[in-house]
Image (cartoon, rainbow, N blue to C red):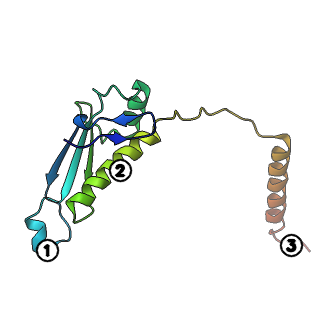
């Protein structure tokens, strides 16, 4: 069973909700690669988690639909390193980053209108370009 994972000073993800599996990773490693399960698949029970607010869980599911299974588990695979230990740490760090990124709700967009000065500058620029193009025509004698 993995250790608990602190997200911030108030939130800690319990280790008993995480399942770490090892598997063989492709890529460099030579003969060592064929004998060692260096990749790590980390499953976190997002649906059953009581430590995260439902809005946070919903934001994670909407932002990362390919990482969330039909059972509500967040699935993270780390296989970039040749070391199982470093891949395990990378998967845990990625889980922390994902949860931290969605703790605060995104700011609502407040619709704005262009200022009078920006409208004026845009029209003057269009007139200037039009005048340049009109001067490219044939010269009358």
Question: Residue sitting at 81 percent across and 46 percent down?
Answer: 118
Q: Which residue is mark 3?
A: 139
- Specify whether 80 is left or right of 55: left
Query: Circle 3 sits in a helix, a strand or a loop, which is it?
Result: loop
Residue lying at the far right in this picture: please name it.
141
Query: Circle 2 sits in a helix, a strand or a loop, which is it?
Result: helix
Structural distance between the alpha carbons of marks 3 and 2: 69 Å
Q: Name the quadrant of the C terminus.
A: bottom right
Q: Earlier in the sequence, mark 3 or mark 2?
A: 2
Query: Circle 1 sits in a helix, a strand or a loop, which is it?
Result: helix
Pointer 2 local density, CA inside 10 Å: few below 14, some 14–19, many at least 20 = few
- Which mark, residue 93? 2
- Specify whether 131 is left or right of 59: right
Structural distance between the alpha carbons of marks 2 and 1: 27 Å
Pointer 3 local density, CA inside 10 Å: few below 14, some 14–19, many at least 20 = few
Callout count: 3
Question: Residue sitting at 26 percent across and 31 percent down?
Answer: 72
17 or 30: nearer the viewer: 17
Rendered location of residue 31, percent (x, y) = 9, 73
Rendered view: 122 above or below 141? above
Question: Residue sitting at 22 percent across and 30 percent down?
Answer: 71
Rendered location of residue 27, percent (x, y) = 20, 67
Q: Nearer the viewer, mark 3 or mark 2?
A: 2
Q: Nearer the viewer, mark 2 or mark 1?
A: 2
Rendered location of residue 126, percent (x, y) = 79, 54
Q: Which residue is mark 1?
A: 30
Q: State if disc 1 and disc 2 touch (CB < 8 Å).
A: no
């Amino acid at each position: 069973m993995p250790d608990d994972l602190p997200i911030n000073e108030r939130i800690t993800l319990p280790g008993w909700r995480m399942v770490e599996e090892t598997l063989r990773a492709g890529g460099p490693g030579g003969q060592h690669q064929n004998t060692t399960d260096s990749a790590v698949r980390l499953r976190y029970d997002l649906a059953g988690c009581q430590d995260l607010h439902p809005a946070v869980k919903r934001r994670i599911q909407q932002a990362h639909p390919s990482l969330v299974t039909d059972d509500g588990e967040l699935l993270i695979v780390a296989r970039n390193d040749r070391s199982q230990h470093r891949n395990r740490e990378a998967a845990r760090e990625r889980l922390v980053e994902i949860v931290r990124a969605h703790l605060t709700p995104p700011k609502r967009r407040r619709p704005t209108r262009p200022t009078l000065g920006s409208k004026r500058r845009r029209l003057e620029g269009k007139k200037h370009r039009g005048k340049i193009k009109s001067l490219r025509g044939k010269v009358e004698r």
